[in-house]
Amino acid sequence: MTRPRRIGVLTFHRCINYGSYWQARCLAEGLRARGHDAVLLDHHSPRINMSEWRCALRPIADAPPAAHRSAYVAKARRFFAAFDGLPLSDPFPLHAPEQSGRYDVVLVGSDEVWNLRHPWYGGEALFYGDGLKAERLASYAASFGSQPAGTGLEQYWSSRLQRFDAISVRDRNSQALVAQATGRQSPLVLDPCLQFAQLIPKTAPPAGSPYAIVYGHGFPAWLQQAIATWASDQGLRLVSIGYHNPWAHEQRIEAGPVEFAAMMAGARAVITNFFHGCIFALVNGKPFVTAPSDYRFNKVRDLVAALGAERHMVSPASGQDDYRQILGDRLDPAIGHSIARLRVQSDAYLDHVLA
């Protein structure tokens, strides 16, 4: 039996983003449920805080309508309260990793921790292991996000990945970049929200009129029109969560992470262009469609391919019959089988890293 380890989890745990929050919480709490002393490494940066908060209050280029500004503020405050409940290390400056403490294992990930194109975390060497004090340095479900494999990595970053004792990723794009940089084939593992899905509350909000969740922003006009027609045909409300989407019937911008999980659990279906919109649909066994933005394309494409769920990624060529079938059917059991197979593979990887 694996002896308890002191584990530091290094990720984007203070992002005002439902997926970032839940994958950080699930990984840390999932490791603690295995009997380990796991904490999220609580790095801080005034520059990154300002960038994060600015994005949270204005997630798209256009300023939100005045009526919704207070809702974005309320959402941010609910995230701040949720952060206080996470299992955190002592705080330390992002650029002083030597103050982060000493650990048996540091797990870098999940999230797009290696994305050198990230608008404010890109190029932060901490996420490539610089300055960390650990007997073993590994990653869990790390991703390069929007950075395509065709760009490769400069030697500076490749040499840092080569110092890792073990690497796992959550998408094939990242797998290809790691192979180019290190010559190693890194295993694909599940996002922590799927790996430790039992840790996410499944309690739905009080019964009311049936609804479908809209999660994301910047949806293309063709998808908005198709979903509006589908929802009208099905007698469903469209509830936009976390962001303002004027084509939805209801805006729940102010929802915190726990409210987000509850609304996802109670939805009939999910319409999303975000990676974790797909993940939470899968966690709850909900039918979903996705049309990922350019920034999220790599992650979503590789997720649906890994699970055999390609039909859920729609395009302008998709017709109303496609939406009725995809959103009206239960998830293909083969998707559940793929998740179960990857869960075993992910468990085996963690067993190896934490042995």
Image (cartoon, rainbow, N blue to C red):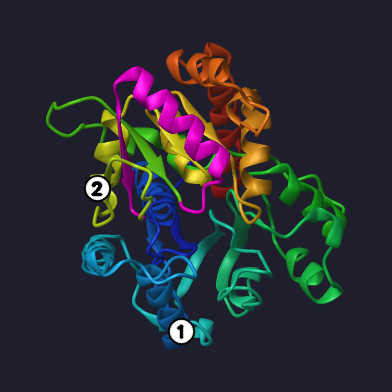
Whether 285 is among the magenta residues is: no
Q: Considering the numbered disc 2 on the image, is that residue within a helix, a strand or a loop?
A: helix
How far across and how far down the image is residue 79, in percent?
A: 28, 63
Comparing 65 with 140, the one in front is: 65
Measure the alpha-carbon separation of dots 2 and 1.
Answer: 31 Å
Q: Residue at x 59, y 45 (%)?
A: 292
Mark 1 is on which residue type? Gln
Mark 1 crowdedness (10 Å alpha carbons): few <14, some 14-19, many ≥20:
some
For the magenta stretch, what is the residue range?
Answer: 217-243
In the rendered image, is residue 302 in sight?
Answer: yes
Comparing 316 with 342, the one in front is: 316
Earlier residue among tags 2 and 1: 1
Say which quarter of the image contains residue 120: bottom right
Q: Residue at x 23, y 65 (%)?
A: 67
Picture layout, residue 292 above or below residue 56: above
Say which quarter of the image contains residue 152: bottom right
Q: Residue at x 67, y 44 (%)?
A: 171
Q: Residue at x 44, y 56 (%)?
A: 20
Residue 284 bears which disc, if any? none
Query: Is residue 209 shown left or right of residue 63?
Result: left
Picture layout, residue 48 above or below residue 8: below
**Residue at the disc numbered 1:** 99
Picture layout, residue 284 above or below residue 12: above
Picture layout, residue 23 above or below residue 59: above
Residue 258 bears which disc, if any? 2
Which numbered mark, 2 or 1, is in the foreground of this view?
Answer: 2
Q: Considering the numbered disc 1 on the image, is that residue within a helix, a strand or a loop?
A: helix
Mark 2 is on which residue type? Val
